[in-house]
């Protein structure tokens, strides 16, 4: 099957991850649109370096630089990791951080077992995402001493590591 790679597959997956999260009404209520730190051209400089209480709950998705490749005679399997960073406005775990982190885990768990393409389409993504063969949370690390995420506030933060698996036919990788 031929896929439309006029936009590269990593950008398609990134935009799909965001679309899938935002399509969930609970996530959309928990994280205001201005607090969704997106690096896809939605905003020129989305990071708020001096965060205020109103800038929380905040979610950011960024690629990790450890893409793995496995080659077969017909396909290349890419394993791409994404770091989903969550910052809460409080030191209370039960009120902010855990409910939001759990909601993200629930949403992305629904994308496992080849459901990513269906979820992306339902969220309004026009790309055929059938080459994404898996999406799952592989790590969750809460902290209250992460200066990069805390900035000028004191609160709990978490990093969720999301693994996506892409299977692309070798013929589609020629330039």
Image (cartoon, rainbow, N blue to C red):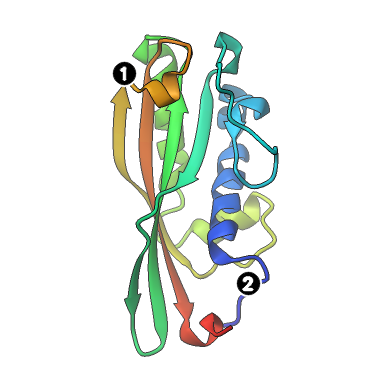
**Few, some or many residues within 10 Å of mark 2 (<14, 14–19, 20+):** some
Mark 1 or mark 2, whichever is nearer to me: 1
Residue at 38% over, 21% down: 147
Q: Which residue is mark 1?
A: 145
**Few, some or many residues within 10 Å of mark 1 (<14, 14–19, 20+):** few
Which residue is nearer to you in this view: 3 or 122?
A: 3
Expressed as whole percent of the image width and height from the top left, the position of residue 16 reads 58, 52
Circle 1: element type: loop
**Splitting the image into 4 quarters, where does residue 65 fall?**
bottom left
Which residue is nearer to you in this view: 62 or 140?
A: 62
Number of dots carrying numbers? 2
Do we see residue 99 in this rendering? no
**Splitting the image into 4 quarters, where does residue 67 fall?**
bottom left
From this view, report whether residue 113 is shown above or below residue 35.
below
Residue at 70% over, 37% down: 43
Left or right of 38 in this view: 99: left
Expressed as whole percent of the image width and height from the top left, the position of residue 71 reads 34, 80
Q: Which residue is mark 2?
A: 5
- Which of the two discs, 1 and 2, labels the residue nearer the N terminus? 2
Expressed as whole percent of the image width and height from the top left, the position of residue 158 reads 37, 28
Circle 2: element type: loop
**Splitting the image into 4 quarters, where does residue 128 fall?**
bottom right
Left or right of 3 in this view: 67: left
Quadrant occupied by the N terminus: bottom right
């Amino acid at each position: 099957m031929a896929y439309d790679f006029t936009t590269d597959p990593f950008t398609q997956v990134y935009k799909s991850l965001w679309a899938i999260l935002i399509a969930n009404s609970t996530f959309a209520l928990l994280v205001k649109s201005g607090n969704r730190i997106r690096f896809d051209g939605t905003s020129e400089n989305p990071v708020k370096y001096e965060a205020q209480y109103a800038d929380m709950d905040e979610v950011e998705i960024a690629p990790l630089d450890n893409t793995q490749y496995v080659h077969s005679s017909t396909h290349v399997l890419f394993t791409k990791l994404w770091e989903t960073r969550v910052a809460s406005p409080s030191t209370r775990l039960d009120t902010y951080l855990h409910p939001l982190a759990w909601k993200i885990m629930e949403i992305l768990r629904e994308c496992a077992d080849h459901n990513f393409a269906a979820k992306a389409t339902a969220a309004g993504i026009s790309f055929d995402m059938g080459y994404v063969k898996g999406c799952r949370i592989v790590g969750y690390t809460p902290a209250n001493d992460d200066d990069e995420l805390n900035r000028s506030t004191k609160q709990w933060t978490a990093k969720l590591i999301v693994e996506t698996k892409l299977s692309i036919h070798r013929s589609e990788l020629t330039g």
